[in-house]
Image (cartoon, rainbow, N blue to C red):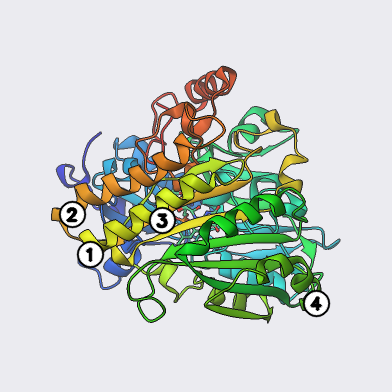
Amino acid sequence: MASLSSKNIDLQVDLGSRLSPSASVVLPGDANFANLTSRWREWRAPTIAAVVQVATEDDVQQVVRFANEYDLPFIARSGGHGATEAMASAKDAIQIDFRKLSQVELSEDGKTAIIGGGATVKGVVEALGKLGKQAVTGICESVGVSAPILGGGHGWLQGQYGLPADQVISARLVLPNGDAVTVSEESYPDLFWAIKGAGHNFGLITEWKYRVYDIKNAKWSYEIFVFSGDKLETLYDLTNEMIKTQPPQVTHWTYITKVADIDPEHPIIWYAIIYDGPAPEARQYAKPIHAIEAIMVNAGEATIPELAVLTFQDENGPGCAKGLTSLRYPIGLKSYNTASVRKVYNEIDETFRKVPELAGSFFLLEGYSTQGVQAIEEASTAFPHRSDEVLVTSYVQYKPNESIDAAAQGFGKKLRNYLLEGSDDPDHLRAYVNYANGDESLQEVYGWEEWRLEKLRKLKQLWDPENKMCYYVPII
Ligand SMILES: Cc1cc2nc3c(=O)[nH]c(=O)nc-3n(C[C@H](O)[C@H](O)[C@H](O)COP(=O)(O)OP(=O)(O)OC[C@H]3O[C@@H](n4cnc5c(N)ncnc54)[C@H](O)[C@@H]3O)c2cc1C
């Protein structure tokens, strides 16, 4: 693919003249270029030659057509939290910046909303919340809503209503050739299937028609525990029992990390029960956990934005902090193999001592409920991991420092391997595409059933034969 700098193009004029009045072309050297291109992970980020802040669907089409005319790479940007190997192969790309397309409009019957392709979790939660509504979104406030949906997605409400991808009634999709289509069960059903799990490969979303629900409880409940490492076996043996009957409104959620103020020597286990319901019900559910001696317990009720703060997933929280090198190595599990989680804990403990630069990393175990997810037929979307009960990944994080990149990668892979070896199927890793490091096989990310990849490859050949959409865990 050609680079912008090698062409004699005046983007402001040649492309700008094709755009709506609210769109803008921002070039390196412009005052807000650095801000617009900043990312959760700057390490191995795409290199951007120009940003186009699109304001209409037609703008998106114009940019795609322009890029194709001049054989230039383009890449979408919504929340800026994407972090996977292939993004680094976008060189001198046009960043199609979706943040102006962030409308949230409730339908008259209150059952659906039109949500812009560039909306963030925070924007959607706030806009719907004002109307007494909620939707299944991811948790981190700064993450875009679209990318999670395109990869299936995970969030607090999935036990009750299904994955983010399951909420889509239709979507407006700008295809890699610049045409715009509506995809739904009735219109381009194969593409509709593909964008719910492997969507990064197929086009650009300008808007979703998305299911929304009444807010049942203005305040949710939380029971947060901090345990020392020696409680690990008791905790995960118990959690394995509790998962078997975990109600749809519950999530259990763990960080294994170092908090020197609490334990200067070893990592702690930060463990939360998040509950869509009143505090007494949550307390009743969490009762067995209270029997394990904790260093700290903090329980109460909170709105969804407050829960984001409590779980470090608010826009100013450490989970969203920018500028670090961050590596993720996801794995889906059916349950916890306690012996494997012990190996993970010990490895973290040892590594933080040996490589102190990595001591700001954390290990995340997300135990969302799955009733709503598993109520949907496994083959009906491109999301391949519906039967997993737990989603786990390390967040290996450190100030950019090339000298420890190799150690950090080895560390993250080792942790995942411990869990894989102790999993229900050690030969078949299942890795959530939106967390994928990018070195996983296509089967690991898009599913082990042969028909899945076959179908995806055929669709790719049909809809993106020139492989323009290739910067997020590409199928080819
Ligand atoms: C701190 C943190 C918390 C997270 N929490 C969750 C969570 O709760 N649930 C969950 O499911 N995932 C979560 N994720 C993973 C998240 O889904 C991915 O990192 C995702 O890629 C981020 O999307 P973004 O819009 O923020 O990033 P961006 O970098 O803007 O986008 C990433 C990629 O998504 C695609 N994309 C974005 N917008 C569009 C669009 N409008 N049309 C087509 N393609 C588009 C493009 O391929 C783009 O390269 C989290 C990630 C982080 C870093």
Q: Nearer the viewer, mark 1 or mark 3?
A: 3
Amino acid type of the residue that numbered disc 2 sits on in the rendered structure: Ile
Amino acid type of the residue that numbered disc 1 sits on in the rendered structure: Glu
Amino acid type of the residue that numbered disc 4 sits on in the rendered structure: Pro
Closest to the observer, 176 or 168: 168
Residue under label 4, please give it.
280
Q: CA distance from mark 2 to mark 1?
A: 8 Å
Closest to the observer, 366 or 63: 366
Tell me the number on the disc at residue 404. 2
**Badge 4 or badge 3: first in the primary sequence:** 4
Count residues near mark 2 (Cα–Cα under 10 Å), then give few for <14, some for 14-19, many for 20+: some
**Residues at badges 2 and 3 in contact (C-beta under 8 Å)?**
no
Query: Quarter holding the N terminus?
Result: top left
**Can the viewer see residue 22 in this picture?**
no
**Residues at badges 2 and 1 in contact (C-beta under 8 Å)?**
yes
Residue under label 3, please give it.
345
Residue under label 1, please give it.
357
Amino acid type of the residue that numbered disc 3 sits on in the rendered structure: Tyr
Q: Quadrant of residue 166?
A: top right
Residue 453, position as x, y percentages in the image: 52, 22
Q: Nearer the viewer, mark 2 or mark 3?
A: 3
Q: CA distance from mark 2 to mark 3?
A: 20 Å
Q: CA distance from mark 4 to mark 3?
A: 32 Å
Closest to the observer, 386 or 171: 386
